[in-house]
Image (spheres, rainbow, N blue to C red):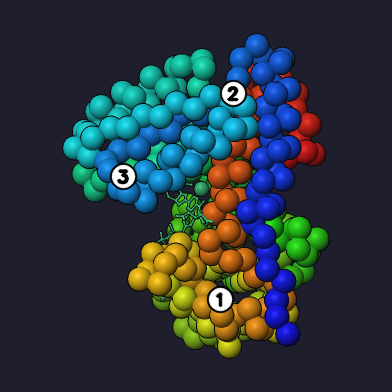
């Protein structure tokens, strides 16, 4: 039996339509469009592709896009100065500094410098704290997009066994926090986990966020499990996930493809966070049930 393929691209397109309605309502009430500033330091080609697609999606949703491209040798003080300028700019509701930054820059200091109310990535310590405390804030886009896909497939996640493979600050840890808040029973696995196969085999939900091409084979997947593949790995065979799709699709109940799964949801959730941030900043009420 073959799994349902979770169409992240179609789900993201529907979400973007609802966001556009809310963005128009915001613009009508505030007298201006919501604005997203994206900062890219250096010339990494993959990052440049993401930044371009974020800019296009922002404009398509009826929001304003501000792109800042800085040379790879930009120093800490110059980047801090740009963040300060964006923090103070009333037309900017969301700020995203594309990661990874060049090694000579202190990414933690930059992310902490962003106004937490404009932190549409949800990486600022204040938003990380809010997520852990269950307080309203801005939630990291990729894990939030994964949660939306899981709830679409499974409905209520209460009591389900979830395994998150990967413990990064941008995907694994916030994913585990969201699943915990949704009342799943959560295991976080990582490079030091003993017998990863056995840990994955007991999961009703597997979220793979490792960055190793096709490392999770189908025979680790419990029959009928829901598999969310966050991995984006460029190989000679093209773009592949962290899950071996060909074998996993034969065992899983539902599975995201790469491309066309989590990636498009990340961008849709970034737009969602931007209109949410804009509405909070201006005190404009939004229909959150649409988002
Ligand atoms: N689709 C999307 O929108 C997005 C996709 N990505 C993709 O998701 C993947 C993960 O990204 P990110 O979280 O930033 O990656 P990181 O490199 O920051 O983290 C990888 C995690 O995987 C763990 N890990 C590494 N090797 C193994 C192993 N052999 N067994 C078990 N765990 C292992 C690491 O463990 P340890 O902590 O012990 O080192 C670490 O916790 C990448 O492919 C990235 O490109 C990322 C963001 C958005
Ligand atoms: N501050 C910051 N925030 C991020 O959210 C962030 C970041 N830095 N750095 C890089 C990662 C990665 N990321 C992706 C976004 C979209 C796709 C995406 O749309 N992927 C398409 C394919 C794109 C392609 O073909 O390359 C898909 O999976 O279908 C992938 C990956 C966001 N990230
Ligand atoms: Mg993100």
In the rendered structure, are the residues bearing label 2 and label 1 in contact, judged by CB atoms less than 8 Å apart? no
Name the residue carrying label 1.
245
- Asked if one can make out residue 98 in the rendered structure from this viewpoint, the answer is yes
Depth order, front residue of 222/176: 222
Q: Earlier in the sequence, mark 2 or mark 1?
A: 2
Query: Which circle, 1 or 3, is nearer the viewer?
Result: 1
Q: Earlier in the sequence, mark 3 or mark 2?
A: 2
Q: Secondary structure at mark 1?
A: helix
Asked which quadrant contains residue 96, the reply is: top left
Q: Position of residue 13 (x, y in %)?
A: 67, 46
Name the residue carrying label 3.
101
Mark 2 closeness class: few <14, some 14–19, many ≥20 residues within 10 Å = many
- Asked if one can make out residue 202 in the rendered structure from this viewpoint, the answer is no
Q: Position of residue 84 (x, y in %)?
A: 38, 22
Q: Earlier in the sequence, mark 1 or mark 3?
A: 3
In the rendered structure, are the residues bearing label 1 and label 3 in contact, judged by CB atoms less than 8 Å apart? no
Q: Secondary structure at mark 3?
A: loop
Q: Which residue is pictured at 73% across the width and 85% down the height?
A: 1
Name the residue carrying label 2.
34
The answer to whether 162 is drawn above or below residue 278 in the figure is: below
Gap in angstroms between the C-alphas marked 1 and 3: 30 Å
Q: Which residue is pictured at 27% across the width and 43% down the height?
A: 43
Residue at the far front in the pictured view: 237
Residue at the far top in the pictured view: 31
The answer to whether 291 is drawn above or below residue 174 in the figure is: above
Depth order, front residue of 259/153: 259
Task: Tell me which image quadrant ligand 1 sits in.
Answer: bottom left
Q: Which residue is pictured at 67% across the width and 78% down the height?
A: 252
Q: How many numbered marks does the figure carry? A: 3
């Amino acid at each position: 039996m073959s799994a349902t393929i979770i169409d992240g691209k179609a789900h993201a397109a529907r979400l973007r339509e609802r966001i556009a309605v809310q963005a128009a309502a915001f613009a009508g009430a505030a007298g201006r469009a919501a604005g997203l500033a994206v900062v890219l330091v250096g010339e990494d080609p993959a990052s440049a592709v993401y930044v371009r697609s974020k800019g296009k999606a922002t404009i398509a949703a009826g929001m304003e896009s501000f792109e800042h491209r800085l040379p790879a040798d930009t120093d800490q003080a110059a980047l801090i100065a740009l963040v300060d300028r964006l923090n103070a700019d009333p037309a900017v509701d969301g700020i995203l500094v594309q990661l990874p930054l060049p090694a000579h820059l202190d990414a933690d200091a930059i992310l902490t410098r962003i106004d937490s109310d404009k932190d549409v990535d949800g990486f600022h310590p204040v938003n990380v704290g809010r997520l852990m405390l269950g307080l309203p804030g801005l939630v990291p886009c990729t894990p939030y997009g994964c949660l939306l896909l899981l709830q679409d497939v499974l409905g209520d996640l209460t009591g389900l066994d979830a395994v998150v493979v990967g413990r990064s600050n941008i995907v694994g840890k916030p994913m585990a926090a969201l699943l915990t808040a949704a009342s799943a029973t959560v295991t976080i696995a990582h490079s030091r986990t003993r017998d990863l196969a056995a840990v994955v085999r007991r999961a009703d939900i597997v979220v793979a966020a490792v960055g190793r091409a096709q490392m999770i084979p189908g025979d680790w997947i419990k029959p009928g499990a829901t598999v969310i593949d966050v991995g984006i790995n460029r190989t000679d065979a093209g773009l592949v996930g962290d899950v071996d799709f060909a074998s996993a699709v034969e065992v899983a109940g539902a599975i995201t493809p790469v491309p066309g799964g989590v990636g498009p949801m990340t961008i849709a959730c970034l737009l969602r966070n931007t209109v949410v941030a804009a509405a909070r900043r201006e005190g404009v009420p939004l229909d959150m049930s649409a988002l």
